[in-house]
Image (spheres, grey):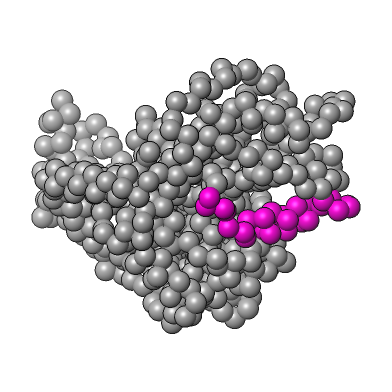
Amino acid sequence: MDHLSSMDAAFLHLETPETPMHVGSLMLFELPQGYQGDYYEDVKAMLGKRLHLCTVFHRKLAQMPFDLADPVWIDDDDVDLDYHVRSVTLRRPGTMAQLEQLVARLHSSLLDRSRPLWEMVVIDGLGNGRVAFYSKAHHSGIDGKAGVEMAKVLYDISPATREVAPPRRARGTGRYQLGVSELLQAAVSNSAQQYLKVAKLLPSAVKALGAAGKVIATRKTVKGERKLGLGLAPKTIFNASITNQRSFSTLSLPLAELKALGARVGGTVNTVVMAMCSGALRRFLKERGLLPKKPLIAAVPVSLRGADDDAMNNQVSMVRVDLATDIDDPAERFKAIHASSEAGKAVVRELKPVLGVDLPVTGAPWLLSGMASLIGRSGLTSRLPAAGNVAISNVPGPPVPLYMAGARMTHFYPVSIPSHGMALNITVQSYAGSLEFGLTACRRVLPQDESHELIEHLRAALREIQNLPGLADAAAAAPQKSLPAAPAPAAPGKKAAKASPSKTTPARKATGGKPKRAAGEAGKRAH
């Protein structure tokens, strides 16, 4: 058995019928020229041969008695592939809008906890002849980076489907679930290990907290400049209790152009994405007369995973970024967003040693589940102060084209999790030279047509950033202080002309009114 970390388990305990806690992807595939087979059957056969390569596909949950502790992962030796992999055909004409609406509906249903926590759907009937593939897996077993690692197992980097070694024969007990005594013993043992880890980490934690405190202390800004410290977020239409109904829309942009744009205007790709979201949300709310005077705040997940860590669990934290929606000038707004984003990441870098630590709490499952149900169904979210207005996530994806069962993947859109108090989640993922946007929201808060409207506002916001002056342009356009003209060199045998007494030159100011002596000393040093 494998123990869930406290962060992994939290995604299970906080799940309610209104807030399914799974993440997903929508992929579009281009079938090989002249293909005549059944793509659904080809995909299912390929997956059947590779399920053993990724633990997410063949493990399920074993719940603790009375929810006294977090559940554990156990192997499932009888995965029903026909249940987990399904097929759907779109009605004519098979537009992208129809596909997005179908994905929104598929994403709204809970995963069956008695089985491995994943499902996949092959979708045909698209008018352009392509095939779509939707997958979802519970966030308790996978985060954005681990999802990319899982994709490397599922997909190929060439049209040829690679062969993999078959799974070895399992030598387990063959029981469907573990006994009560085994589960309780595992819970006690795991809790003891967690407390020991926390005790060993205390010296490092003190150091990390001190370093983070220094970073925060250096955030002092000059009088009149925008503060980097953020208070509570203003209330917006997105800070509401949600239902399980979803809306979903997509956008694809060339990654190289966004990288060049970020470098030109003094930011990163992440800054460009944040500024696009800021401009789009600002325009969307302003058109409805709903733009608050205070700036919107984004909740931005950041990865705590090391470069060589390929564990399939969650290692993330969150920073709050000022979206500066109260600033009219796009250039000033861009600078404020970049400064806030960099300041938040600096604090997380210092706190990284302690942010991912398991904190065991006896009875946490029923306590967290009860709180999640209370907050969602009581409508408290609409009345409680908001920490953030919208979730915005940027996940690095595969840089090269991928193939599945011989078909080339043309797009790889993320489908994510809205929550109570943050009814809109904007997730961005890079793939093969593109930056793929996926907007997932509660349909009651952001209907499908308004989600598409927000996509158009994102395009408009990008054009606005493209029209900003670059760093070189801004430097050239900045007002330059005029320097006094240097005196003409004296003719041989004549003294240099004195400066006019009515105008004090910089040299006179610096030397207390004795420019001739300063010039003479400079001449001596030059020789």
Q: Position of residue 179 (x, y in %)?
A: 37, 46
Q: Residue at x 24, y 49 (%)?
A: 188
In this rendering, would 316 be left or right of 505? right
Q: Position of residue 337 (x, y in %)?
A: 43, 58
Residue span colored magenta: 90-114
Residue 358 part of the magenta-drawn span: no
**In this view of the protein, which residue sits in the foreground, 465 or 24?**
24
Residue 112 part of the magenta-drawn span: yes
Q: Residue at x 38, y 38 (%)?
A: 1
**In this view of the protein, which residue sits in the foreground, 226 or 469?**
226
**In this view of the protein, which residue sits in the foreground, 104 or 78?**
78
Asked if one can make out residue 407 in the rendered structure from this viewpoint, the answer is no
In this rendering, would 244 be left or right of 226? right
Asked if one can make out residue 366 in the rendered structure from this viewpoint, the answer is yes
Quarter of the view holding residue 313: top left
In the image, is residue 287 above or below residue 423?
Answer: below
